[in-house]
């Protein structure tokens, strides 16, 4: 179940200072999680194409391994993919992931965050999830918006961008 507010803009890339679109999605345990649940803390929302694939596993494990430092600096981490709840639960268990994974099967949240769009692979063009990371500040505004990020090395770059490794 996806719940976006009526004024949620679709397909426009977010920039710093924009209001982050609110949403409600199911987590790996089937419970509702909303962006407003994280209000008062900074939140890293990272959009990834598919659980249990090599790149997505690498990125998720990098977030898992950096979670202590991120939380110590006041950041929560939330992964969002178009995978169903059951696949997220298996992925979280297999990799020991210690942060919420949310299911966006209809990709409406990814669209609202401009993380869904045209992709090319082996000469074919199709619509799919664009690996992206949006950092939302404690007041619900976008602090950082990164699109077309690489799975490998992205978390380390994000930590540098957030001045966590100074």
Image: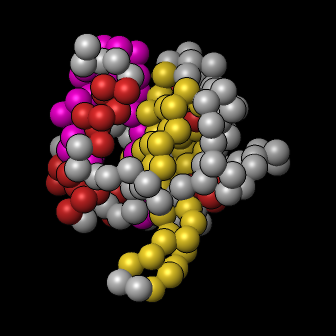
Q: Is residue 130 above or below residue 138?
A: below
Give residue 83's quadrant in the image.
bottom left
* Viewer can see residue 19: yes
The residue under the point 25% across, 13% down is 166
Seen at 20% across and 62% down, the residue is 54
Magenta stretch: includes residue 78:
yes
Q: Is residue 84 left or right of residue 11?
A: left
Please, which residue is most extreme toward the right here?
A: 6
Q: How is the image coloured?
A: secondary structure
| Residue 147 lies in the magenta-colored region | no
Give the left or right position of residue 18, taking residue 41 as reference.
Answer: right
Where is residue 68 drawn, in percent x and y? 24, 22
Q: In front: 41, or 129?
A: 129
Q: Can residue 27 be seen in this view?
A: no
Q: In which quarter of the image is residue 63?
A: top left
Q: What residue lies at 58% left-to-right and 35% top-to-bottom?
A: 35
Q: Where is residue 43 in the image (x, y as percent from the top left)?
A: 47, 28
Q: Which of 60 and 26 is in front in this view?
A: 60
Residue at image position (35%, 64%) is: 50
Tell me residue 21's x, y (percent): 67, 40
* Residue 120 point in image, percent of width and height: 45, 76
Q: Is residue 16 above or below residue 117?
A: above
**Image quarter in which the N terminus is found:** bottom right
Q: Which residues, given as a range, are shown in magenta?
A: 59-83
Image: 129 above or below 164: below
Residue closest to the far front: 123
Question: In this image, 156 relative to 9: left or right?
Answer: left
């Amino acid at each position: 179940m996806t719940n976006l507010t009526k004024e949620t803009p679709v397909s426009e890339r977010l920039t710093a200072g924009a209001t982050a679109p609110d949403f409600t999605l199911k987590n790996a345990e089937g419970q509702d999680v909303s962006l407003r649940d994280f209000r008062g803390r900074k939140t890293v929302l990272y959009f990834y194409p598919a659980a249990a694939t090599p790149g997505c596993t690498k990125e998720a494990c990098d977030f898992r391994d950096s979670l202590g430092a991120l939380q110590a600096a006041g950041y929560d981490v939330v992964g969002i993919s178009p995978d169903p709840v059951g696949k997220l639960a298996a992925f979280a268990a297999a990799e020991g992931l210690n942060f919420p994974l949310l299911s966006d099967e209809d990709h409406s949240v990814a669209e609202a965050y401009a993380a869904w769009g045209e992709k090319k692979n082996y000469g074919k063009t199709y619509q799919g999830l664009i690996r992206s990371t949006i950092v939302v500040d404690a007041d619900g505004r976008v602090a950082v918006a990164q699109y077309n990020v690489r799975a490998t090395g992205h978390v380390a770059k994000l930590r540098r961008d957030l001045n966590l490794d100074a």
